[in-house]
């Protein structure tokens, strides 16, 4: 084993142990070579060693497949980015008829369509799952007019997947396999549980009441959510995927998959982001962020007890992928630590969280309250000379679900950040390092909280 291999393997083992992660895999592309570090087991109940070919649920990193497949259709002249979505999905109905007619393909891909984060629906596992999902969108109110703001949306990407189905005449999964997986040699990447179960795969874990990892019983989301978060892959395949996006549009065997200029277009800023962990801007799908003066391009993803992080640095022909099978208290922290270590160890690029301001009671009182979207609530409260934030799935969503959902997160510290944009950072527990900002109306009253690109509207206080 080389010194570089030893260093990465030691980092992965030490960090996974520190954060209580049962199994993890990290891959790095640097100086024209691949380096891997793997540790732990696929499952605490049925353990197998994690290796570079072990499949993890990708969560939202899947969106990069959806966007790239659509961009291949754009390059072939079969889809236009500025065209209305209804050109390709004429059955689209929203409560706001004008918005349904105006939303463009690009607005889906850069999260500016005004669509909410998620829909809590399961439309089955049949080939009509996406069509049925889109039909349910008739019940989903917009959070903003199309093009008015960036707001991260699983709903938008599932609708983008339906465009792929309509244009190709194939299911989303078959079309993406043909457009991307097969020509790129991503033979260990799939959406189908029947494909995954014949290989070595990681099971998600959440922390039980006694503090030990317990199996997450829902392995992946429903089929209607595949375009936004339903892929599964290995660290080796994901490093190959990253190398493709660092390249000139050819597969490793020389097959032309996309023009180089289309790959570069995906990495150009389309809309700025404010106070977000996701980055400084959205490209086409990608989160764009300057780290220590260096431009990075990436995407993260979460599933029930699993996390994936992919980051590339184009000017250094560098990529790092981190995958872990633990919930946010351990998995998110592991991935962040592994990616930051790789950036500093290989490139000398240091990624640090901003320092929050000292306690300011007047500002703190202003933000205290409950904020909610369709699925979750944020509760911000004071505790001594400090603020806390608690993140929870709504009780009615838990009651209505017939599958296990991730546990709620305990309250964690929240610090307000310098500047006049009402930004904040979470300083502890499972979401440590996550950033957001508070939104105000024209009169200056706080009306919402944005966390990691997702809008939570303030819940009015009820009088007793």
Image: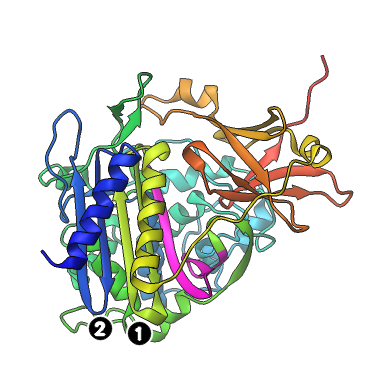
Q: Is residue 415 magenta?
A: no
Expressed as whole percent of the image width and height from the top left, the position of residue 443 reads 89, 49
The answer to which of 35 and 422 lies nearer the viewer is 35
Expressed as whole percent of the image width and height from the top left, the position of residue 105 reads 52, 66
Tell me which corner region of the image, top left, top right, bottom left or bottom right, holds residue 53.
Answer: bottom left
Expressed as whole percent of the image width and height from the top left, the position of residue 184 reads 21, 71
The answer to which of 385 and 440 lies nearer the viewer is 385
Image quadrant for the C terminus? top right
**Can you say whether 239 is above or below 61 in the image?**
below
Q: Look at the image and give the residue range highlighted in magenta.
A: 280-303
Q: Are marks 2 and 1 in contact (CB under 8 Å)?
A: yes
Category of crowding for the residue at label 2, using alpha-carbon neighbours closer than 10 angstroms: few (below 14), some (14–19), many (at least 20):
some
Q: Is residue 280 left or right of residue 191?
A: right
Q: Work out which residue is located at the far right of the displayed protein and give it.
A: 443
The residue pinned by badge 1 equals: 259
Tell me, yes or no, if residue 83 can be seen here: yes
Q: Secondary structure at mark 2?
A: loop
Q: Write the residue at 64% across / 48% down.
A: 450
User: Could you say which disc has been placed on residue 459 in the image?
Assistant: none
Q: CA distance from mark 2 to mark 1?
A: 7 Å
Expressed as whole percent of the image width and height from the top left, the position of residue 367 reads 75, 38
Q: How is the image coloured?
A: rainbow
Q: Write the residue at 15% across / 51% down.
A: 51
Q: Is residue 131 left or right of residue 107?
A: left
The residue pinned by badge 2 equals: 256
């Amino acid at each position: 084993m080389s010194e570089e291999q030893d260093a990465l393997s030691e980092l992965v083992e030490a960090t996974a142990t520190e954060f209580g992660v049962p199994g993890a895999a990290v891959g790095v592309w640097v100086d024209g070579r691949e380096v891997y570090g793997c540790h732990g087991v696929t499952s605490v109940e049925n353990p197998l060693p994690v290796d570079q070919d072990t499949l993890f649920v990708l969560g939202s990193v899947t969106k990069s497949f959806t966007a790239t497949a659509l961009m291949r259709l754009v390059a072939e002249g079969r889809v236009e980015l500025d065209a209305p979505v209804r050109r390709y999905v004429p059955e689209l109905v929203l409560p706001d008829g004008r918005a349904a007619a105006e939303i463009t393909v690009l607005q889906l891909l850069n999260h500016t369509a005004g669509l909410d984060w998620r829909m809590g629906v399961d439309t089955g596992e049949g080939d009509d799952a996406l069509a049925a999902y889109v039909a349910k969108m008739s019940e989903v109110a917009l959070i903003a007019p199309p093009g008015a703001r960036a707001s991260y949306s699983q709903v938008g990407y599932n609708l983008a997947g339906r465009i792929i189905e309509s244009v190709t005449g194939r299911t989303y999964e078959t079309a993406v396999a043909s457009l991307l997986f097969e020509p790129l040699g991503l033979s260990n990447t799939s959406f189908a549980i029947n494909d995954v179960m014949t290989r070595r795969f990681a099971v998600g874990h959440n922390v039980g009441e006694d503090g030990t990892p317990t199996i997450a019983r829902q392995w992946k989301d429903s089929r209607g959510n595949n375009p936004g978060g339903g892929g599964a892959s290995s660290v080796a395949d994901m490093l190959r995927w990253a190398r493709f996006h660092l390249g000139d549009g050819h597969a490793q065997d020389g097959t032309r998959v996309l023009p180089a200029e289309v790959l570069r277009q995906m990495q150009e800023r389309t809309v700025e982001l404010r106070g977000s962990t996701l980055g400084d801007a959205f490209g086409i799908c990608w989160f764009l962020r300057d780290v220590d003066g260096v431009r990075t391009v990436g995407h993260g993803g979460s599933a029930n007890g699993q996390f994936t992080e992919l980051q590339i640095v184009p000017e250094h022909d560098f990529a790092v992928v981190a995958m872990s099978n633990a919930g946010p208290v351990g998995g998110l922290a592991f991935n962040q630590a592994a990616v930051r270590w790789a950036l500093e160890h290989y490139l000398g690029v240091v990624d640090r969280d901003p320092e929050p301001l000292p306690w300011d009671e007047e500002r703190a009182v202003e933000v205290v309250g409950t904020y909610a979207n369709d699925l979750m609530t944020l509760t911000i409260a004071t505790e001594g000379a400090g603020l806390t934030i608690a993140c929870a799935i709504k009780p009615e969503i838990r009651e209505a679900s017939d599958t296990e959902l991730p546990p709620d997160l305990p309250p964690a510290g929240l610090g307000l950040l310098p500047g006049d944009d009402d930004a904040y950072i979470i300083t502890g527990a499972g979401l440590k390092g996550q950033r957001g900002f508070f939104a105000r109306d024209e009169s200056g009253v706080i009306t919402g909280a944005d966390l990691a690109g997702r809008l939570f509207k303030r819940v009015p206080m009820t009088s007793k």
